[in-house]
């Protein structure tokens, strides 16, 4: 855990020192996007190679769909309420 926090703090310090260099920031944004794609691909490979997950995918899929739909509905409802309370000008 200390290693993760130290790496993150180091990255924050480096980002603070390099924020004036737009070229570095732009390149970093592209690298982050590709890193996320790579992580998602590797997670897919890991899930696909796990027999236990693949054998119970039908029941996990239904539960995941229910949880995802609830999360999306809750986010939309919360966003709507916040918009009505704070941002609507009558």
Image (cartoon, grey):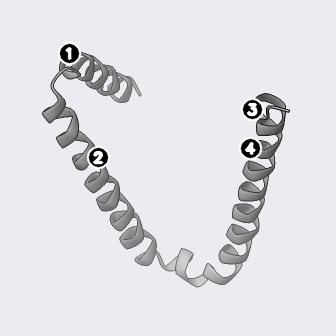
From what the image shows, is residue 36 above or below residue 84? below
Q: Secondary structure at mark 3?
A: helix
Which residue in the structure is indicated by mark 3? 87
Q: CA distance from mark 4 to mark 3?
A: 11 Å
From what the image shows, is residue 32 above or below residue 8? below
Does the CB distance between marks 1 and 2 fall below 8 Å?
Answer: no
Q: CA distance from mark 1 to mark 2?
A: 18 Å
Q: Secondary structure at mark 2?
A: helix
Q: Nearer the viewer, mark 1 or mark 3?
A: 3
* Among numbered discs 4 and 3, the one appearing first in the sequence: 4
Which quarter of the figure is the C terminus placed in?
A: top right
Q: CA distance from mark 2 to mark 3?
A: 32 Å
Q: Nearer the viewer, mark 2 or mark 3?
A: 3
Which residue in the structure is indicated by mark 4? 79
Which residue in the structure is indicated by mark 2? 32
Q: Secondary structure at mark 4?
A: helix
* Among numbered discs 4 and 1, the one appearing first in the sequence: 1
């Amino acid at each position: 855990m200390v290693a993760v926090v130290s790496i993150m703090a180091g990255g924050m310090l480096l980002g603070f020192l390099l924020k004036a260099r737009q070229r570095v920031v732009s390149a970093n944004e592209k690298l982050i996007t590709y890193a996320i794609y790579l992580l998602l691909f590797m997670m897919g490979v890991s899930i696909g190679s796990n027999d236990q997950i693949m054998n119970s995918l039908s029941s996990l899929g239904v539960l995941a769909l229910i949880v995802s739909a609830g999360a999306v509905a809750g986010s939309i409802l919360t966003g709507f309420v916040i918009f009505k309370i704070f941002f609507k000008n009558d």
